[in-house]
Amino acid sequence: MTPGLHHYLIVSALLFSLGVFGVVSRRSLLVIYMSLELMLNAANLALVAFSQFNNNLDGQVMVFFIITVAAAEVAVGLALIVALYRKRRSAHVEDLTSLKY
Amino acid sequence: MPEFTDLLFYAFAGLTLLCGFLCVANPLSRNPVTSAMFLVLTIISMAGLFVLLHAFFLAAVQVLVYAGAVMVLFLFVIMLLNIKEEERRKMNIAAVGVGAVAVATLAGILVRALWHATPLATTATVEGSTRTLGRILFTRYLLPFEVLSVLLLVAMVGVILLSRKELK
């Protein structure tokens, strides 16, 4: 069967679900961050597929912007993780509960 | 008789999902470096999907920016912090199980909705080459493009502020 728009969207949906599962199941801040990247990539795939099958390049420009924003976000987020690690000696979500109680 | 590009789609899609699964839930290793490596593989096979969608420029950017710059940053921080603790701690099986059920429900709803959707009649013709994408980026999307450069500057200043020796 020739892959159509919904094939790409199904791959994107499954990839997004994998990212959500990583966020809820893993306890290391860095792996949670990687799962976030996975979710962003799933959104990118959906946008490119929509852009392609609607004959409209705007979706691909959007993906370009998303990639740039994600790069900036990764830089800031990793700097935050390093700063946290320096203060707490841990990058584990179970050790970062001082706002919980 | 399926065409070669159709087979490529299924190969890249399967590879993307397999490597994505091994990135978030590897049954053999809980080392963050393994996760990062499988995330690189996911990103590269997704660039293959972009090529199949005729988004050639984005495929190149995906490999250069994500697999190149972002993942190197990740690996750099993993090595810097020397994170090994997750291997020692035992996981909360009940929490992971409930999370898996919730996520499987979400995935099931999405896939079921997409499976029964009527597909678009149009076939793919638009081509995201560097020339066409550059033209649209520097005409209609010029202002967002410039705003994005300011965002990158802000992020850079923020990172420098965060990584100083003592945070005020």
Image (cartoon, grey):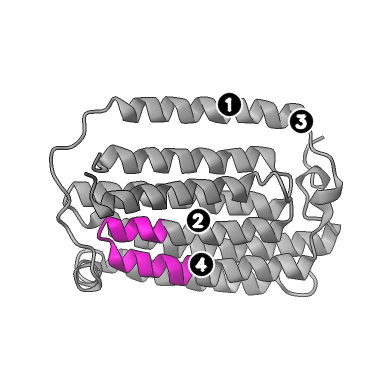
| Quarter location, residue B113 | top left
B36 in relation to B150, above or below? above
N-terminal label among 2 and 4: 2
Q: Are marks 4 and 3 in contact (CB under 8 Å)?
A: no
Dot 2 falls on a residue whose secondary structure is helix
In front here: B147 or A23? A23
Where residue B67 is drawn, which disc sits there? Answer: 4
Q: Chain of mark 1?
A: B
Image point 54% across, 41% down: which residue?
A18
Visible residue check, residue B167: no
The kind of residue on which mark 2 rests is Thr
Image point 35% across, 40% down: which residue?
A9
Left or right side of B100 for A8: left
User: Which residues, given as a range, are shown in magenta?
Assistant: B46-67
Image point 79% across, 38% down: which residue?
B91
Classed neighbour count for the residue bearing mark 1: other residues with Cα under 10 Å, few (<14), some (14–19), many (≥20):
some
Please give the residue where the numbered disc 1 appears in the rendered image: B102
Classed neighbour count for the residue bearing mark 4: other residues with Cα under 10 Å, few (<14), some (14–19), many (≥20):
many
Query: Are discs 1 and 4 located on one and the same chain?
Result: yes
N-terminal label among 2 and 1: 2
Q: Quadrant of the C terminus of chain A?
A: top right
Q: Nearer the viewer, mark 2 or mark 4?
A: 2
Please give the residue where the numbered disc 3 appears in the rendered image: B93
